[in-house]
Amino acid sequence: METIHSLLYGFQVALQPTHLIYCFFGVLIGTLVGVLPGLGPASAIAILLPATFKVTPVSSFIMLAGIYYGAMYGGSTTSILVNIPGEAASVVTCLDGYQMALKGRAGPALGIAAFGSFIAGTFAVIALTFVAPPLAGMALKFGPPEYFSMMIVGILLLTYLSSGSMIKALLTAGFGLIISGVGMDTIGGEYRFTYGIRMLLDGIGIVPTVMGLFGISEVLMNLETEIRRDILTNRVKNLLPTLKDWADSIWSIIRGTVLGFFLGIIPGGGAVIASFASYAIEKKVSKHPEEFGKGAIQGVAGPEAANNAAAGGAFIPLLTLGIPANPVVAVLLGSLIIHGLQPGPMLLSKAPDVFWGTIVSMYIGNGMLLVLNLPLIPLWIQVLKVPYYLLYPLIFLFCLVGSYSIENNVGDVVIMLIFGIVGYLMKKFRYEGAPLVLALVLGKMLETTLRQSLILSMGDFSIFVSRPISLGFLIVAALLLIIPVITQRKKLSTLEE
Amino acid sequence: MSRADRISGIVWLLFSVFISIDSYRMGLGTLHQPGPGFLFFWIAVTMAILSIVIFVRAWVGKNAEGPESSIFGKENVLKIIFVLLSLFLYAFFMETLGFIPVTLLLFIFLLRMIEKKRLGFTIFVSVVVTGASYLIFEIWLKSQLPKGLLEFLRF
């Protein structure tokens, strides 16, 4: 009953004309960002962050959240029509979406992606509404050891789920933890890893790092291999999926939604992993797995539902525990802090307007996206026609201005460019950027909770295993480290046989 | 990826050794009262071990993989270097010259020198983009971009 009351309060907040306008702009910009390759939601939120300094925290958060889940909708358009993912969570949609388009079924592909996204997005928000408040209550019982163990699980999970080598992912996570220590030590007050360089005194910001790793490096990769874009424009018709399309894809949407939601909640999970996992499951359960990669509608419906559900699910750890589940949410967390709000269990009681206003705005935003997405497809096609030689200087300009505007500091621009090079080299040497960012985001909190726990226990490490919740997290962490070793041994022994 | 892994393994190892020495110097503290270098020292030690694993694996698999391909595509490396150079120059001069001149110069450089577009087209696009971005960021979004040389205009 209390949830219903709070929900009604949320509607009161979200339906205010100003908030509706911010929500609309958020989802519109999000869709555009999703459509444009090379500019992801993390960079877009970071770029627009300074623009929200002068508005209320509710308006700001409603818009920035809208960019995030809006991008999940937009990403599918580019994947289906151009075979280039607009953002990372839509990579897998290319496989069957583009094949459908080649067969003249771009319309149903776009349609099922939009409807699947809507169903999943709405489910995630409903689940968020009912799961978040009790979880926030439970999180109040968490002490430093529980937070520490949970963050360890988050980082290990991301390294475990990373597509490449887990050792490489662990190395990048370690690198992220180390650079999170640059700047002033929050407990002792001394400077670390600054080497007399002024721009390092305030530490390495998440926003410039994300922009460099994902924005600049992506463009550099694209410059190396010229992008060819054959846009299918004359075949987009019959956007509404037929009854057969629905029958073929409804279970994929349901499976994708549930899977995506749970992967979204877990720190380290997120939309990219959810979409890949959903595709793998759909291929496995299908009676015709040979059709995957040749235009199976399930290969579009499942992953698109999964990435939207994951985007919604990721708000749960942010709003209840103050823990960002992925880099995009980390930037959102930064926006809350800039507005003087501390994300976590106290957010619900200290800023109920932000908490419930944002949740309800997501119901409204999902509706807006469904209405927006299909009729605006011709417009997005026009946007995609912008040649890359014009697009990439614009992306550079957005990143340069965005990183400068955070604190009107050239140092942030230089940090962004350096991480652009780091990201480019990491791509070349097959290292993933996501573990680095998550570790950078969680690093300070991880160190503080570790040191607080040890001070609490007088230096006794058993504090992490003597408390049941912390022990539970550490068991999961240990499993995440052991499973790859066992599976690799098995692989080796079968090879030897 | 064997060659790339051998190179990256060495780079990570050097980085880890450097960080572990630096963290040790900062002070590890005691278990009762961990010092500022405590966590980072142990992370660096773990990273050193992992980097050795990467290197050894790549070294062992060196001969099994056949001929090794180059890590960087040779054709466009110069293009990337010039683009990066222009971006760093943008950052270094944005406060002294101001947003408008550096943005104009960046676009002229990228379109004319890197993309080899016609001069008229280059100038047209550069002026339009610079003007539009100034209106969006400075006037609409109130981003407080650096004025630099044009400070006296105070617009």
Image (spheres, helix red, strand yellow):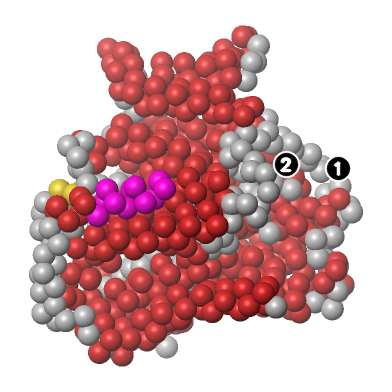
- Which quarter of the figure is the C terminus of chain A placed in? bottom right
| Residue underneath mark 1 | A234
Is residue A470 placed above or below B76 in the rendered structure? below
Is residue A189 placed above or below A37 in the rendered structure? below
- The span shown in magenta is B10-20
Give residue B63's position: percent from left, percent from top.
62, 52
Give residue A280's position: percent from left, percent from top.
69, 71
Tell which circle, 2 or 1, labels the residue nearer the N-terminal end: 1
Q: Is residue A39 left or right of residue A321?
A: right
Is residue A360 placed above or below A129 in the rendered structure? above
Q: Quadrant of residue B53?
A: bottom left
Q: Is residue B122 visible?
A: yes
- Amino acid type shown at disc 1: Asn
Furthest-right residue in this view: A103
Q: Circle 1 — which element? A: loop
Between residue A138 and residue A410, name the one nearer to us: A410
| Residue underneath mark 2 | A381
Q: Residues within 10 Å of mark 1 (few under 14, many from 20)?
A: few
Is residue B66 placed above or below A216 in the rendered structure? below
Q: Which mark is residue A90?
A: none
- Amino acid type shown at disc 2: Ile
Between residue B139 and residue A339, name the one nearer to us: A339
Give residue A406's position: percent from left, percent from top.
33, 41
Give residue A299's position: percent from left, percent from top.
75, 66
The verdict on residue A52 being magenta is: no
Between residue A199 and residue A130, name the one nearer to us: A199
- Which quarter of the figure is the N terminus of chain A placed in? bottom left
The verdict on residue B15 being magenta is: yes
Furthest-top residue in this view: B119
Main SS of the magenta segment?
helix
Q: Is residue A239 visible?
A: no
